[in-house]
Image (tube, rainbow, N blue to C red):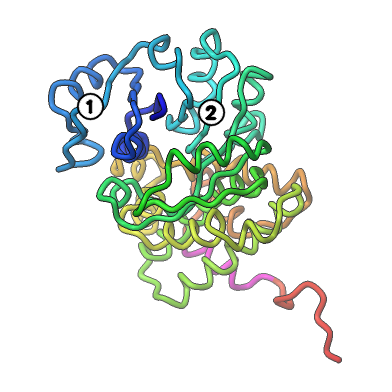
Amino acid sequence: MANISVLGAGSWGTALAVLLCKNGHKVTLWSYRNDQTEELRRTHKNESKLPGVLLPEKLIYTSSIEEAATGKDLIVFAVPSKATRKTALNFKPFIHNQKIITVAKGIEEDTLMLQGEILEDVFKDEATVGVLSGPSHAEEVVLLQPTVVVIGSKDRNLCVFAQELFMNDSFRVYISPDIRGIEIGGSLKNVIALAAGMADGLGFGDNAKAALITRGIKEISNLAIAMGASSETLAGLSGIGDLIVTCESRHSRNRRAGVLIGQGMKMQEAMDKVAMIVEGVYSAKAAKALGEKYGIELPIIEEVNRILFCDADPRESVLSLMKRDKKSEISAPDWD
C-alpha cells in the first residue's frame, strides 16, 4: 500500500483519488478551499463535479498543505493548469526528494512551459516529475469503465512505480520516456477540440469534424516533432487518442465551450456557461506563440485564437481555412 496525495478536488482529481483508493492505497484528496473539504468529509460526495458518485469511506480529505505533502510516496498534481505554478510554490517548503505526477494539460502563457517543466522549474532537484495523459474522462474513470492512458517521465523508475499504483482491471497504463510529446499532445488537443465544438455549433457534419481531427493532429505533430518529441507519441494515446475523445465526447468541456461559441456566444460567455475550467482557452495563445517560436504553421490554432481573442466570426474562419493555398497532403510527394 502506498501513501498518496491528490492535489485538486475537481472532477479529474476526485476520480483519480477514487481509483487509487480502490486500488488499496492510502489516499488524501487536497483542496485549497476549506468549505469544499468540509463538504467532502461530511457527504462523501463531490456533487458539483461528479454527480451521483459516492466516494470511498476511507478517502481522506484535507486543506492543509503540510498534511498533503508530508510522508507521501507520490503526489499527484490535478489542479487546473493555470494554478500549477502557484500551487507548486505553496507546496515547495514541504517537498524533499519527492515523486510527483501531473495530470493537468496546458501551457503556461508567459513562459511557454509545459506542466512538467513548471514543476521541475519550481522544485529543482527536490522532485522527480512525470505526467499522466490519454483519453480519460473523469466521468467514466470513476465508474470503472475501461480506460487506457500513458505515464511519461525522464526517469523510468518513476514510470514503473506510478504504473503499478494506477493500473487495475479497468485502468490500463503504458509508460514512455517522451514526456514532451505526451504533454504537447495533451495540451494542444484542447485547442483543436474548441474548433471541433465550433463546427458542431455551426451545424456542420461528420466531414468537417473528421477534417478538423485529422488536420489538427497534423498541426500538433508538426509542432511536437519540431520541439523534439517522437512522432510515435502523437500517433498514440496522448496524441490522436486524446484528440478523438476530446473532440467527440459529451463530457468534453472544451468541445462544449466550442459549441456555444459556434452558436454565437463570446468566449467569456461560453466559459461562464460551461462553469468549468476550459483549458483550451488558456493554451491557445501559448500554442500560437510556440508555433511562431519554432516556425511551424498552425492554421487551425491561429483561427481559434482569432475567434477567441479578436472576435472573428467562426464562419469566416472556416472559409479562411478552406481557401488557403493549394497544397500536397504529404511533405515530399514522389510521383515516380
Mark number for residue 58? 1
Q: Which residue type carries mark 2?
A: Ile
* Residue at image mark 2: 100
Extreme-bottom residue of the structure: 336
Q: Could you tell which of marks 2 and 1 lies nearer the N-terminus?
A: 1
Where does residue 36 sit, x and y in percent of width and height?
A: 24, 21
- Residue drawn at x 66%, y 58% is 221
- Residue drawn at x 54%, y 53% is 238
- Distance from disc 2 to disc 1, alpha carbons, whole Å, reads 22 Å
Instruction: Please state which of residues 108 and 174 is positioned toward the viewer in this rendering.
Output: 174
- Residue drawn at x 33%, y 14% is 63
Instruction: Please state which of residues 170 and 184 is positioned toward the viewer in this rendering.
Output: 170
Q: Residues within 10 Å of mark 1 (few under 14, many from 20)?
A: some
Q: Which residues are magenta?
A: 315-324
In this view of the protein, can residue 37 be seen by the observer?
A: yes
Q: Residues within 10 Å of mark 2 (few under 14, many from 20)?
A: many
Secondary structure at badge 1 equals loop
Q: Relative to residue 22, is residue 180 drawn left or right?
A: right
